[in-house]
Amino acid sequence: MPTDFYGRVMMVFQRYGMSMLQGAGTSLQIALVGTLAGCIIGFAVGLVQTIPAEKGDNPVKRGILWVIKFILNAYVEFFRGTPMMAQAMFIWYGLMPLLGINATIQQAAYFILSINTGAYMAETVRGGILSIDPGQTEGAKAIGMTHVQTMLYVILPQALRNIMPQIGNNLIINIKDSCVLSVIGVAELLYKTKAAAGALYMNFETYTITMIMYFIMTFTCSRILRWWEKRMDGAENFDLATTDTLAHTSGMTHYPDPKGKKEDA
């Protein structure tokens, strides 16, 4: 048995490193799938929540829209207002057996994390849509675009850039919070860590390795997402496309005046 801390850490990694790496891979996989599916759910819910109910609409349409929005709001508030650990226990040990749903633990983990992320993303998307200048929507309607067309071609491309940091934040949170799913037996990183620590009675050394693994995953994902955000920003300087050869598109142009000075055109 090594007497120094570094030696004990290396001993733990040699014995259980492969098992912990497999758990880290499971954590990352669940987080990626849950975040992607959660974003899809969030976009769908956020779009429906922003559908305007105008006075001239059919009363039946307004009534149906109110019911749908009420159900979606209840979903968002419930999953944002309860811990994911309780949700996992409720769904895996209660709801799925009650409904006769035969799913694996991995499939249940994907589902739990997806609907939890979807609730948070719904509010993010709604806020991102409402942050866009209302004049954009008015201009789109003025040229005859429907609500769906306005969202797809005018509002969402701008809102997506605004909410990209939050999408990345949700991914990083999901990588860490996937450890909650160990309560239903998901063999992710923390589950593997508990097994290694219990076998060797080396909690400090084992959890040191686990924290380093979590940090590597979250730091790498955050750098990739930062790069993606910069790519979405585009070039810092650009020329406007125009067919008018007399129009100057490269900024302020200076013309000499009779006195030898320059004026801004």
Image (cartoon, rainbow, N blue to C red):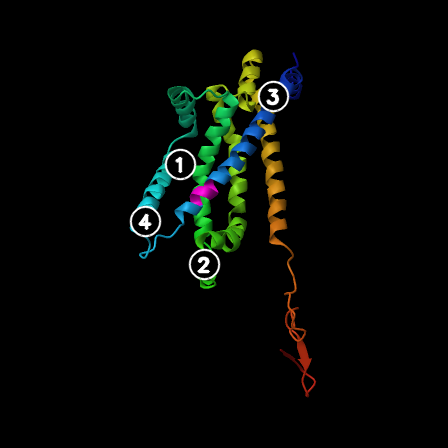
Q: Quick one: label 3 or label 2, which is nearer the N terminus?
A: 3
**Mark 4 secondary-structure assignment:** helix
Callout in the foreground (2, 4): 4
Alpha-carbon distance for marks 4 and 3? 53 Å
Callout in the foreground (3, 2): 2
Alpha-carbon distance for marks 1 and 2? 29 Å
Reading the image, the residue beneath label 1 is: 80
- The amino acid at mark 2 is Thr
Contact (CB < 8 A) between labels 1 and 3?
no
Q: Quick one: label 4 or label 3, which is nearer the N terminus?
A: 3
Alpha-carbon distance for marks 1 and 4? 27 Å
In this rendered view, identify the residue nearer to me: 10 or 189.
189
Q: Which numbered tag is attached to residue 20?
A: 3
Reading the image, the residue beneath label 2 is: 137
Q: Residue at x 63, y 45 (%)?
A: 227
Contact (CB < 8 A) between labels 1 and 4?
no
Up-down relation of residue 55 to residue 76 (above or below): below
Q: Residue at x 48, y 33 (%)?
A: 114
Q: Position of residue 80 (x, y in %)?
A: 40, 36
Q: Quick one: label 1 or label 3, which is nearer the N terminus?
A: 3
Q: Residue at x 57, y 16 (%)?
A: 196
> Residue 43: within the magenta?
yes
> Residue 117: within the magenta?
no
- The amino acid at mark 1 is Arg
In this rendered view, identify the residue nearer to me: 98 or 210.
98
Alpha-carbon distance for marks 3 and 2? 50 Å
Q: Which class describes the residues within 10 Å of circle 2: few (<14), some (14-19), or many (20+)?
A: some
Alpha-carbon distance for marks 1 and 3? 30 Å
